[in-house]
Image: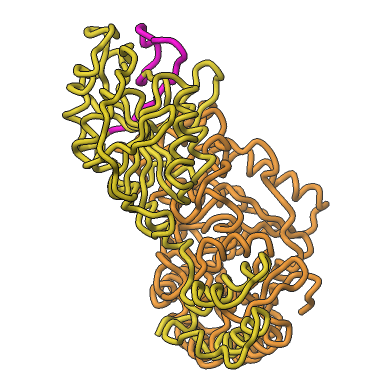
Chain colours: A yellow, B orange
């Protein structure tokens, strides 16, 4: 967990194409948060991320299904970086979050990679347990998030300065299974935390990128599962563009169309609308067909 | 396969904890202060966790023995349930657990001795009246026993107490611990059964009907009282045919005289849990069925439910004596 010099100003970048992953799409999305540019660089090149040109307190990058923010060191920056990335990337629902960064450990070899299975906020004295619901490409450990550089490594775990705040804020935006932390050991008792250049940081990170990419891949898949499950059901766009539905009616319509997808997957709901002239009549017409289907159907899929 | 085991600091050195950890030597062990730090926290997703649940070893401090829900029973007046485990290895679409907990981790409480103490204390409070205890409300009673060894501990506690009854509710075929000991007349091994086509569609991970029937036969042959639980009875356009075939298949295998008790219960969900389950599985054919809100519950419409119940009851009467047949209904719905 070495101290890094302040981030140098970013060179100007060419204008960016539109985001590849739109908020409405049901593909998986992963948001990455790093503290320093030195941590970001190997990810940018491996994942093909490009800088977003915008006025803002943080550097932001994006590519296919992956967004990244360089938040700066410490808990406050990490929390602010999560909120910034969430807002600036369109508030995408069910996006996964991954904090990638360097950390220190008493004995682990430099370059060792560890997922965080318990994130301890040392100052506050509380812990978060990210559920590890994907195949782990590396071992996991406790991550101790400290407010000042810890060179003594008193506990058996890696020491960082962002993970606890990252998890606390990111779980405001998605379920905790999709909020993970992965750390690369950059200092230990033999190689203490001294000022490290961004280049040295990149060097430490680079060999771990394959493992990090595997975690990103799995998180994208989980994000996609959740996003598909909450995608608009068939017929939704058609019906809501034809008529104006109240908020309550929209909830009822969504449930109705979901049941329609379950029981009448081969039937087009629009064929049952008849001469319906409004939202209420349309739902009534659909409900009539669906109620009959509920009694005619089998729980066993045909 | 358990890859992650969370252990409460308080039970880290407990012999049962050590035994479980020895069973999973490759699992990552993570210490926590209380299991609630890990289990059922805000912002957890049952369905996502169910893909790779962890195991939590903890101590149950209170509320170890609780009154069974009204209408739950097999003839006794004093009915209680206890849960040495939360969550189930199986993934049945109708299971209320997926709506009750946000977490799919398995929680095992290792302080079995405290459970037994409370079971006996509750029995004494009844002044000698027969007391029925139900295991399998929050978890299958048998399927995880190779890890917990709970049966090996709990069964001796019921030995020699004729007015103390235990029901082990299960879909599992892991009956070896029962076959390994002398049968007990006050311990009912109750198997949940559904028509095989429905079981395949909605009881994910559970043994097929044929395997359960084989297990029932072996348990009955060993002298254990066997219960049959047709609960929940699931609506299907072909339900009469499906349940007729099921009952025929069961009683062709097992004589009705060998059955201790049979209960029938309708598909039902507490309303708040149904909302959660439906959000998690929005295109489930089971949940899209003819279900309606009835008070605080969601179930089939009263008339349909009565028709299904009467059909099953009449069909079962042909196989088992009336006095062994029980309805498992919320009390306010009546039989």
Q: Residue at x 63, y 60 (%)?
A: B273
Residue A148's x, y, as percent? 44, 10
Residue B81's x, y, as percent? 67, 55
Q: Residue at x 30, y 29 (%)?
A: A114
Near-viewer residue (A169 or A140): A169
Q: Is residue A151 magenta?
A: yes
Q: Is residue B55 shown left or right of residue B266?
A: left
Image quarter of residue B187: bottom right
Q: Residue at x 55, y 62 (%)?
A: B279
Residue A150's place in the image compared with A145, above or below, is above
Residue A152's x, y, as percent? 36, 6
Residue B242's place in the image compared with A38, above or below, is below
Residue extending furthest toward the right: B127
Is residue B239 among what the camera can see?
Answer: no
Residue B120's x, y, as percent? 70, 46
Per the rendered image, the range of residues in magenta is A139-158
Q: Residue at x 22, y 7 (%)?
A: A190
Near-viewer residue (B331 or A215): A215
Near-viewer residue (A293 or B216): A293
């Amino acid at each position: 967990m070495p101290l890094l010099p302040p981030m140098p100003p970013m060179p100007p970048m060419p204008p960016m194409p539109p985001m590849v992953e739109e908020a409405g799409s049901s593909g998986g999305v992963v948001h990455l948060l790093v503290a320093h540019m030195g941590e970001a660089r190997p990810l940018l090149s491996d994942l093909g991320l490009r800088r977003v040109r915008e006025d803002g307190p943080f550097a932001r990058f994006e590519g296919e299904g992956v967004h990244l923010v360089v938040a700066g060191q410490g808990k406050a920056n990490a929390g602010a970086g999560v909120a910034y990335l969430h807002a600036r990337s369109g508030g995408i629902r069910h996006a996964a979050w991954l904090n990638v960064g360097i950390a220190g450990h008493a004995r682990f070899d430099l370059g060792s990679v560890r997922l965080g299975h318990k994130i301890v906020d040392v100052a506050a004295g509380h812990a978060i347990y990210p559920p590890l619901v994907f195949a782990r490409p590396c071992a996991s450990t406790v991550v101790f998030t400290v407010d000042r550089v810890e060179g003594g490594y008193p506990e058996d775990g890696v020491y960082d300065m962002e993970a606890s705040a990252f998890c606390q804020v990111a779980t405001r935006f998605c379920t905790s299974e999709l909020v993970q932390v992965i750390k690369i050991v950059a200092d230990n008792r033999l190689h203490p935390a001294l000022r490290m250049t961004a280049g040295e940081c990149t060097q430490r990170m680079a060999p771990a990128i394959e493992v990090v990419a595997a975690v990103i891949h799995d998180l994208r898949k989980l994000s996609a599962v959740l996003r598909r499950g909450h995608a608009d059901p068939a017929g939704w766009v058609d019906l809501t563009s034809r008529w104006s539905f109240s908020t309550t009616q929209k909830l009822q319509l969504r449930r109705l169309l979901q049941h329609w997808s379950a029981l009448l997957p081969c039937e087009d709901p629009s064929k049952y609308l008849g001469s319906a002239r409004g939202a209420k009549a349309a739902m009534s017409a659909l409900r009539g067909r669906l109620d009959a289907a509920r009694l005619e159907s089998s729980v066993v899929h045909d | 396969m358990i890859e992650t085991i969370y252990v409460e600091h308080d039970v880290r050195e407990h012999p049962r904890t050590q035994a479980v950890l020895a069973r999973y030597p490759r699992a990552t062990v993570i210490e926590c202060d209380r299991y609630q730090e890990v289990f059922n926290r805000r912002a957890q997703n049952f369905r996502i966790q169910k893909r790779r649940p962890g195991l939590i070893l903890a101590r149950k401090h209170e509320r170890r023995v609780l009154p069974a829900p009204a209408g739950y029973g097999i003839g006794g007046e004093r009915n209680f349930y206890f849960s040495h485990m939360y969550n189930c290895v199986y993934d049945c679409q109708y299971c209320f657990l997926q709506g009750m907990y946000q977490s799919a981790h398995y929680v095992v409480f290792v302080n079995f001795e405290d459970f037994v103490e409370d079971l006996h204390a509750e029995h004494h409070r009844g002044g000698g009246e027969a007391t029925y205890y139900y295991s399998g409300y929050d978890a299958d009673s048998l399927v995880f026993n190779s890890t917990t060894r709970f049966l090996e501990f709990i069964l001796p506690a019921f030995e020699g107490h004729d007015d103390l009854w235990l029901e082990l509710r299960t879909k599992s075929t892991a009956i070896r611990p029962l076959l390994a000991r002398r049968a007990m007349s006050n311990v009912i091994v109750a198997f949940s059964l559904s028509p095989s086509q429905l079981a395949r569609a909605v009881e994910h991970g559970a043994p097929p009907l044929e395997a359960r029937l084989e297990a029932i036969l072996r348990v009955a042959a060993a002298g254990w009282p066997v219960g049959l639980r047709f609960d929940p009875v699931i609506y299907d356009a072909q339900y009469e045919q499906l349940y007729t075939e099921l009952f025929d298949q069961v009683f062709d295998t097992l004589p009705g005289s060998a059955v201790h008790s049979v209960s029938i219960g309708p598909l039902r969900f507490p309303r708040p849990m149904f909302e959660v389950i439906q959000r998690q599985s929005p295109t489930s054919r089971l949940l899209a069925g003819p279900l309606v809100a009835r008070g605080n519950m969601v179930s089939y419409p009263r008339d349909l439910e009565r028709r299904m119940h009467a059909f099953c009851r009449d069909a079962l009467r042909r196989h088992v004596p009336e006095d062994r047949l029980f309805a498992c209904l919320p009390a306010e719905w009546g039989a």
